[in-house]
Every structure is written in C-alpha cells, then in structure tokens.
C-alpha cells in the first residue's frame, strides 16, 4: 500500500510542479489575495462557490505564491481522499472492493488533474467521503462522537461547493435508513440536530450569496455559455436522450476515455443490481447502500432537467465520483467471470490496472480541458518573456480569463481587477510598464461573432495607439485554426506558445 500511495502522490506533485496556473486557478488566487480576511470574504461572494476555499487560500498565500506552493494543500487533500475512500469502502463492501476503489481514486485522470488545481473539488470530495466514513463508524459502534464528526464534515462540504447539497440529500436519506434499520435510537436526536445544522448553513448561504448571484444574472450567464450543453433545454432536448448521453459523457469525463468510461458505467449498474438483490449478510444495509450510490445521479439529473444545475462531462459534477467509484468497485468485485480456480481473483486487478493505464496513456477527455503537455510552466515563461520585450507603454488587449493570468504572471498582483460584473465594455488598467485593456463579459473567452465590435471599442479606448497586443490563455477556442485565420485577416501576427497561450500583435486598421 505505501508504494501505491507514493505513486499517486508523486504523480500529483509532478503535475503541480510542471504546470502553469489556468485562468480559474489564477482567479481564485486573485480573490484570496486581499489585504484582509474580510475583503477576501467579500470577494468570494462574487463567485458561484461558497467562501471557504478562498478564505483558506487567503492565509496560505501569505506564506508563498508559487504555483507549486499554492497547490500543495489541494494535492494533500486529494491523497487523503483516496485513503478515506479505502477505509469507507472497506467498511461497507469488504477489503477487495476497497482496494479497487482506492486504485481508481488514486489514478482516475479526472481526480489526478483536479487534485493539483487550486479549486474547491479536492476538499469537497475529502469532506464528503469523511462524512460517510464517520457516519458508518457511528452506526457500527454507536458513537455520538462519530455522528458529530460526520455532521462537521458535511458542514465543511456545504461551505466548499454548492453541489454538496446533492451529497447532503443522498447521505441524509442513507443515514436515516441505516439508523432506523439498525435501531440506533440513541443516535437519532444527535443525527437530526446535525441535519438541522446543515439546513441552517444552506439557508445562510442562500441569504448571503446565492440570492445576490441570482440577481446579478451570473448563473444564467454560466448556463448560457460554457455549461450550456450540460443543462436541459426544453423544446430542444429529449429527456431520455439527454439523460443517456450526458451520463455516458460524465463517465467519459471521470476516466478521460469513452470506452473505459462506458465499461465503468456498466460495472456501476452491476454493483447497484447486486446490492439490490442481496440475500446474504445484511440485505437491508446493502439495499440502503444501493440507494446511496444511485440517488445522487438521479437528483443531479433531475436538477439539470429543471435547469438548476449542469449534468454532463464537466468538473461541476465530479462530486458524483464519490458514489461512482464504490459502485464500480463493488460491481467488479462481485462480477462472476465463470473462471476456475483463483484465475478470477488475479484477472480482475489486471483488468482494472489495464483500464487505468489506458485512461492515463491514451486519454480522450470530454469538456474544456488543457492537456498537461500544453500547460508546462516553460510555455508561460516564454510567453511572458515575449511580452516583456515589447516597448514601454505598449497596450495589451485580453479577455477576462487572460486578465487574471496576466495579473499573476506579468503584473505582480498590481491590477485592481473588479470583482462584480461591469457595465463598461472595456476596462483599462496599468500593469508595470504596460497598459492592459480587458474586454468585459468574456468569461468564456472572446465571442467570435462579436469580436470585431469589441476590437473597435478597444481601439476607441486608446486613441493614438497604432498596435494592440492580444493575449489569451486557458480555454481559447475549439476551432483554433479558424480563430488564427481571422486574426491574420485583421493584419495580426499570431504566435502560439502551445495551443493554450496566444499572443497576437494587431495593427490599427487603415481608415
């Protein structure tokens, strides 16, 4: 086991060391890098996430600001998550299923990449599985202390990411069923008090943040741009087709491989079916476990159909891997391969290892992503060195993604970027020896159809300038060649530093 975890840990450390900050990571750093905790909290309220991670990052960034150092807490949380997954699955499904689940948690590509990024997900997953583990311990050992720990981790999950609401629902139903079926009456009052505390946190978050975000229109803007394909559109999508295709896309995202993702989904269904048909051991417990593994998918899909939350192959649904991995492990463990002797016991780990190797060495991920080889820090350093060769007082032109990247890598946190949505189409900032024009309303990058109009407004913002130096970083465009050709048609000279960093000098058009 130590070698197992060492391999997963080193894999994550390597990625954390080699890669530059993507725009979302740079944004989270910028929000946290405020003069006081109060200001960091106020900045966090402008995002679509609860405030806890920003507050944690506020203190951590006071110690160091390198990419590697900023990512260390998230790497640690990702590894501890794998260990607690092993402990929990061992409690509910046995040692062999626990090993299978641990292997997937350590080496599933989506979990590896997310646990080296400055995002909420490493801590979200850790808090959720800790809540489940301590709930199981409390029921098995009749411990009030463990119930309190379970509730505490549930609160932390709710304060980390809003998808934890789906976890709270599934874990709440499971906890009630388990307490009733095991007749743990002494624990019920404490458990009910814990659930009431979770509800109070949800109400508080709605008052302090969610209601304000709704009035700002941010959720609608997100649903209309990069998450549009993950939300059901009545009159355009068929319910059955949406549910089937988005579920398969979700499992493709989990494992970065269409075939492996489909096989994993089949194994999850096998695992749930086995639990529902259980006749040995504790059948009621196994049926409750089946409901726990299935219900989050149903609730998240229902939320997507209602237009409340995305469901599909993006990181926003990574919470569901907490339930997918144990189900897949149980399905693989209890799948009968009709083989003699001990061959079946050997073949299953080999098949799992082969699948994980295929996912990592020939990935085909879904959704917006940056491949690790295109995110090397050297590429960003080359791009920044290229910008530093520009004449003094040159004007850089960028979108919202690029602005936070420039603020971290070029400006030394000196740009006073706004937190709330802006009405002005172009904002002007000073960045060392340069000026930076930021096009607002470009969270998903430049809209191709509106770019000529935005570019014209940029020229109007800096009368007398003869050249704008366009900078983009992150998820630039799925049709990169067309975008480069359009820039050339404007007289630009685009230069790529890998597919996910672009600098292009655009001359003033002749009138």
Image: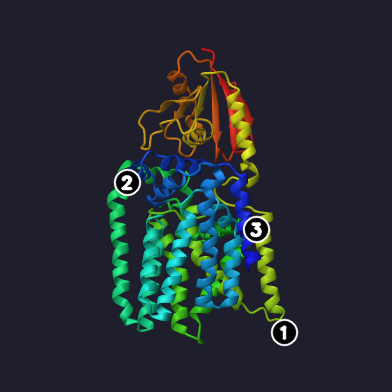
Foreground mark, 1 or 2, reads: 1
N-terminal-most mark, 1 or 2: 2
The spot of residue 443 in percent (x, y) is 45, 38
Frontmost residue, 141 versus 370: 141
Residue 89 lies, with reference to residue 437, above or below; the image says below
Residue at 42 percent of width and 45 percent of height: 58
Frontmost residue, 333 versus 413: 413
In this view of the protein, can residue 257 be seen by the observer? no
Q: CA distance from mark 1 to mark 2?
A: 60 Å
The spot of residue 299 in percent (x, y) is 41, 63
Residue 249 lies, with reference to residue 347, above or below; the image says above
Number of marks in picture: 3
Residue labelled with disc 3: 359
SS of the residue under disc 3: helix
N-terminal-most mark, 3 or 2: 2
SS of the residue under disc 1: loop
Residue labelled with disc 1: 341
Residue at 55 percent of width and 78 percent of height: 94
Residue labelled with disc 2: 214
Q: CA distance from mark 3 to mark 2?
A: 38 Å
SS of the residue under disc 2: helix
Q: To which quarter of the image does residue 83 belong? A: bottom right
N-terminal-most mark, 1 or 3: 1
The spot of residue 198 in percent (x, y) is 32, 63
């Amino acid at each position: 086991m130590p070698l197992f975890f060492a391999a997963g840990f080193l894999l994550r450390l390597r990625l954390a060391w080699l890669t530059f900050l993507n725009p979302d990571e740079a944004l989270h750093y910028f929000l946290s890098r405020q003069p006081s905790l109060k200001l960091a909290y106020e900045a966090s309220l402008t995002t679509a996430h609860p405030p806890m991670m920003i507050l944690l990052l506020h203190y951590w960034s006071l110690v160091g600001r390198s990419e590697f150092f900023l990512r260390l807490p998230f790497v640690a949380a990702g590894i501890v998550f794998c260990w607690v997954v092993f402990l929990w699955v061992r409690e509910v499904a046995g040692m062999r299923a626990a090993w299978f689940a641990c292997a997937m948690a350590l080496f599933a590509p989506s979990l590896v990449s997310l646990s080296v990024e400055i995002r909420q997900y490493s801590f979200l997953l850790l808090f959720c599985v800790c809540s489940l583990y301590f709930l199981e311990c409390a029921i098995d050992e009749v411990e009030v202390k463990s119930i309190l720990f379970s509730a505490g981790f549930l609160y932390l999950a709710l304060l980390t990411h809003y998808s934890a609401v789906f976890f709270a629902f599934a874990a709440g139903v499971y906890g009630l069923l388990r307490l009733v079926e095991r007749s743990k009456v002494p624990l019920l009052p404490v458990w009910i008090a814990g659930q009431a505390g979770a509800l109070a946190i949800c109400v508080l978050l709605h008052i302090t943040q969610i209601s304000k975000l709704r009035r700002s229109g941010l959720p609608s803007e997100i649903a209309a741009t990069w998450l549009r394909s993950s939300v059901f559109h009545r009159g355009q999508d068929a319910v059955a087709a949406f549910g089937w295709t988005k579920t398969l896309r979700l499992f493709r995202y989990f494992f970065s491989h269409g075939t492996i993702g489909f096989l994993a989904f089949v194994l999850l269904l096998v695992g749930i079916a086995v639990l529902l048909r259980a006749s040995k051991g504790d059948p009621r417990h196994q049926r409750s476990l089946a409901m726990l593994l299935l219900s989050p998918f149903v609730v998240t899909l229902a939320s997507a159909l209602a237009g409340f939350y995305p469901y599909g192959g993006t990181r926003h649904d990574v919470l569901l891997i907490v339930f997918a991995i144990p189900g897949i492990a149980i399905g693989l463990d209890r799948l009968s391969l009709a083989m003699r002797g001990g061959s079946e016991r050997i073949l299953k780990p080999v098949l799992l290892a082969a699948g994980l190797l295929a996912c990592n060495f020939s990935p085909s991920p879904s959704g917006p992503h940056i491949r690790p080889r295109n995110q090397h820090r050297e590429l960003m350093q080359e791009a920044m060195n290229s910008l530093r060769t520009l004449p003094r007082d040159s004007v850089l032109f960028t979108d919202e993604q690029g602005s936070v990247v420039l603020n971290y890598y070029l400006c030394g946190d000196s740009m006073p970027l706004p937190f709330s949505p802006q009405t002005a189409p172009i904002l002007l900032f000073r960045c060392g020896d340069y000026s930076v024009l930021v096009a607002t309303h470009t969270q998903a990058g430049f809209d191709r159809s509106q770019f000529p109009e935005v570019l014209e407004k940029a020229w109007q913002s800096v009368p007398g300038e003869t050249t704008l130096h366009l900078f983009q970083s992150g998820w630039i465009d799925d049709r990169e060649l067309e975008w480069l050709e359009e820039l050339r048609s404007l007289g630009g000279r685009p230069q790529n530093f890998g597919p996910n960093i672009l600098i292009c000098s655009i001359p003033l058009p002749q009138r």
